[in-house]
Image (cartoon, rainbow, N blue to C red):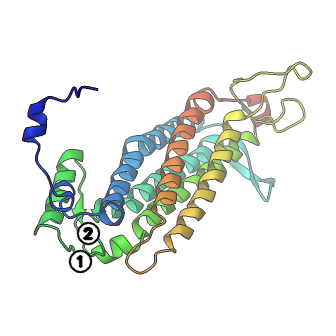
Amino acid sequence: MTSTVPKTWLVTRTIVSGASQVTAGMLLAADTFPTAMHITAVKAVHESLLPSVRALQQAIEAKSEQWRNVVKIGRTHLEDAVPLTVGQEWSGYASQLQQAVDRVATSAEGLFEVAAGGTAVGTGLNAPPGSAEQVAAEIASATGCPYTTAKNKFAAQGGLDAMVGASAGLRALAVPLMKIANDIRWPGFGPCCGLGELILPANEPGSSIMPGKVNPTQCEAMVMVCIQVLSEDTAIAFAGSQGNFELNAMRPVVINNFLHAATILADACTKLRQYCIEGIQLNRDQTDH
């Protein structure tokens, strides 16, 4: 066959050095992949998860204000206790989520340190002088986030502590979300033989043999997401403990679990807000009883 490649391409091609010109001394597994992990994780947290949680928190806060004067019975140990208002009860949910937002943001701060420039074992061998700082500055400029070069490349490459810490923030969000989802679906059970204090939106109303039944599907979905996130956090923590000498090679399972956890949390918060919180109503016949 006759080659279709122009002869000028063959004449003018230049041999480049993979180490010095393509990767600038950096190594994919050792310092570049960890850097990419941090950038991707920050993006997932700040551009997707936190906006979704804040919107849910605001929707719950609005319901708290709407129901601030509606008195109901409080419960401890699942038993009747003393009265409080529905607004007071829901203000607790809103406050829990605000605190969780702060914890997620704080726990992700360690991700702003990047390992790029540490090369093979953290010494910066073969990297041009100042390249670590330059790479971090370029990333900061491109993303608008305060990325800096890691103070200690040996810790950044031999460990996964920043990712483990950021995952702990996701866990700190999943815990109150599960509590809130359960606190909403329990008062909604009925409609005839349960508490029936909340009227949940009928996203999937009734069935062929139970026409009055409205399942708390969005709450159940949130509970399942939280179970998954807690499990993934355990996997991330375990992987973080498996660093050997100058490299923790468990990075793929860590970033896979982290991104999945952040993604499903964001989606579950959006869906709970849209298809449950915003349309939920009080059954005053029950709360006033």
Residue closer to the observer: 212 or 143: 143
Seen in the picture, residue 256 relative to 151 is either above or below; the reply is above
Vertical comparison of 139 with 57: above or below: below
Name the spot of residue 149 as percent of width and height, x first: 22, 65
Position of 248 relative to 219 (above/below): below
Circles 1 and 2 in contact, beta carbons < 8 Å: yes
Residue pictured at 43% horizontal, 68% vertical = 160
Would residue 215 appear left or right of 28 to someone viewing this image? right
Q: Position of residue 182 (x, y in %)?
A: 71, 46
Residue pushed farthest front? Answer: 1
- Callout 1, which amino acid? Thr
Indicate the secondary structure of the residue bearing disc 2: loop
Image position, residue 281 (x, y; %): 67, 28
Residue under circle 2?
119
Question: Which residue is located at x 28 percent, y 73 percent?
Answer: 153
Q: Position of residue 8 (x, y in %)?
A: 8, 33
Please indicate whether residue 228 sits to the left or right of residue 256 in the image.
right
Q: Quadrant of the C terminus?
A: top right
User: Between 7 and 202, which is closer to the camera in this rendering?
Assistant: 7
Q: Using residue 27 as the reference point, say whether residue 11 is left or right of it.
A: left
Q: Could you say which is closer to the camera, residue 122 or residue 82?
A: 122
Mark 1 vs mark 2, CA separation in Å: 7 Å
Quadrant of the image containing the N terminus: top left
Task: From the viewer's perspective, tell me whether residue 277 is left or right of residue 145.
Answer: right
User: Can I make out residue 76 in this image?
Assistant: yes
Q: As shown in the figure, which amino acid type bears the numbered disc 2? A: Thr
Label 2 CA crowd tier, 10 Å (few <14, some 14–19, many 20+):
many
Query: Which residue is the site of mark 1?
Result: 123
**Is residue 66 at all visible to an observer of this figure?**
no
Name the residue: 70% across, 46% down. 183
**Secondary structure at numbered mark 1:** loop
Q: Residue furthest right?
A: 209
